[in-house]
Image (spheres, rainbow, N blue to C red):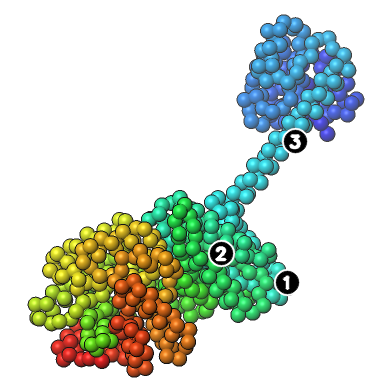
Amino acid sequence: MTTILIIEDVQALREEIMETLVYEGFDVLEAENGLVGVQVAKTYLPNLIICDIAMPELDGYGTILALRQETSTSMIPFIFLTALTERGDMRQAMQLGADDYLTKPFTSAELLGAIASRLNKYDSVKEHYYGEIKAVGDKYKYLSHHDELTQLPNRIALYESLNQAVLHAKINNKPLALLFLDMDNFNIINNTLGNDIGDQLFKAIAERLRRHAAPCDVVARIQGDEFALIISDVSDIGSVKLAAQKILDLLSRPYNLYGHEVFITSSIGITIFPYDQQEAEGLIKNAELAMYYAKSHGRNSYKLYSSDLNVQSSEYMALANSLHRAIDRREIRVFYQPLVSLKSGKIVGAEALARWQHPDLGLILPSKFIPVAEQTGLILRLSELILWSVCEQMKLWREQGLDYGFVAVNLSGQHFLPDNNLLEIISKVLLETGVESHQLELELTEGIIMQNAEFTVNVLTQLQSMGVKVAIDDFGTGYSSLSYLKHFPVNTLKIDRCFIQDVTSDRHDATISLAIIDLAHSLSLEVVAEGVETFEQVEFLRAHGCDQVQGYFFSPPLPVAEFEKMVLEGKCL
């Protein structure tokens, strides 16, 4: 029921108005002056107030001023009653916030007409106001549940969607998959090409995932460079693996952004309901753990969650803490794997490979601790330590008259960020050790070059002008186009071991290997085959013009003393 408050000091007029309104079906409150009227209005919050202007103690002007200053009463429609006819009086009433006024004497029809007009307007305003509130609320809900840049659902929305998906999966007795995706080395793109291109890349990734996902699936951006995908229609684990591989392939295709051809890969963690976990929180934890495992074990890959990962996660933390101390305590050792010429059969150089001599765990291979160093930010210190160690060793060998050829040192993509001063570091090491620049070769992968081709090519050009040799490691496994290759200032291509392993029995591996050899020679580059383990592989590579080989057929990586002994003894193929 609509409640109206009458504030009028003349009792007869107040009662007359009340009688009229009660008859019309209104609920009526009364007050004999402004002071009482303000208290009644605050207590009962009427739908409309009718108030006289000329009253003792607190007049109508003071009453409306007091009510408009209170949040709870500021919007109540207000009609003045007055015997005053001056325009100035009416103007003052309206300026103070009155909605209408009636001049005494007035008829019942005029009174009811004014009330109806104010209530209708108030209802209209209220409806509009509530509509705006709802629109703001809807917008706030959308913004609170969506990523502002990509417009994908965010972590909050993912959690809610996952809860719903799990509920449906339980009811229908069907499995579902949760995939967490992390973009590999995204910080390199952001730091070299800038935040604008980084943002555009995120939007392009989001659009690819959105177009790829089925209508019943959910794609979300969790944070930064992490995305997620809920796959509801899961037939078996094999179908999930296939879906993950398709996503890896999809995201690794080049992106054309502001004239830059940008390449990026991803690491995916997968968990399956109900086999791994039956609640949303546990599924999210599992998917994240599997994703970080994939990221730390080669990247551009996916990993299915297993309970063993919980143990490995604890081991990872222990390894990361120990690695900090290992660098300070000089526990990192450098082994040397010979590079052998297929023409002469002699050792012409070596690749420096790090080993961690852990006081408790023994010798730890780089596949175990290099990913930890990359993720914890220790890779720059570690690489610089290895570079100094190698060059100091080459200085000793030169002083001993040992003809070791050259030594190749691997570099991380983090070295090719503008702030990491790679050129200054190389110059300082060569200067202080006295090593000839042509005796040092730096190895980097295609992926490192393609993260920011223009910047990296500029750095490599300056390195070559210094006389330092450059090799592309694991060639054939990355995403560089052949049109780019002719612009890379490099000296050597190293064929990845995955093509060499079956080169004598697999037609495709043989074709790829021969194509790389022909391509390299057409560009006046040398070719090294990695992972050579059999005599048949050596003969195949020799017959097809490969320049050098490296692998366990000739020698595993050796400690300094054993490598020196092998060189002094003149071991040949």
Q: What residue would you read off at disc 3?
A: 127
Check the image and name the residue furthest to the front.
Answer: 522
Residue 362 position, x and y percent, is 29, 84
Residue closest to the eye, 472 or 22:
472
- Labels 1 & 3 near each other (Cβ < 8 A): no
Q: What residue would you read off at disc 1?
A: 171
Q: Which mark is in front, 2 or 1?
A: 2
| Residue type highlighted by circle 3 | Glu
In the rendered image, is residue 473 in sight? no
| Residue type highlighted by circle 1 | Ile
Q: What residue would you read off at disc 2?
A: 228
Asked if residue 492 lies left or right of residue 252, the reply is left
Crowding at mark 3 (Cα within 10 Å: few <14, some 14-19, many 20+): few
How far apart are the alpha carbons under marks 2 and 3?
A: 40 Å
Residue 102 position, x and y percent, is 79, 14
- The mark found on residue 363 in the picture is none
Above or below: residue 453 compared with residue 246: above
Above or below: residue 545 compared with residue 372: below
Task: State the image quarter where residue 357 is shown.
Answer: bottom left
Residue closest to the eye, 338 or 26:
338
Crowding at mark 1 (Cα within 10 Å: few <14, some 14-19, many 20+): few
Q: Which residue corresponds to the image point at 26% horizontal and 83% vertical from the top-left?
A: 339
Residue closest to the eye, 36 or 166:
166
Say what secondary structure mark 1 lies in: helix
Check the image and name the residue furthest to the right.
Answer: 23
Counting labels gives: 3
In the rendered view of the protein, which quadrant contains the N terminus? top right
The mark that comes first in sequence, 2 or 3, is 3
Asked if residue 187 lies left or right of residue 204, the reply is left
In the rendered view of the protein, which quadrant contains the C terminus? bottom left
- Labels 2 & 1 near each other (Cβ < 8 A): no
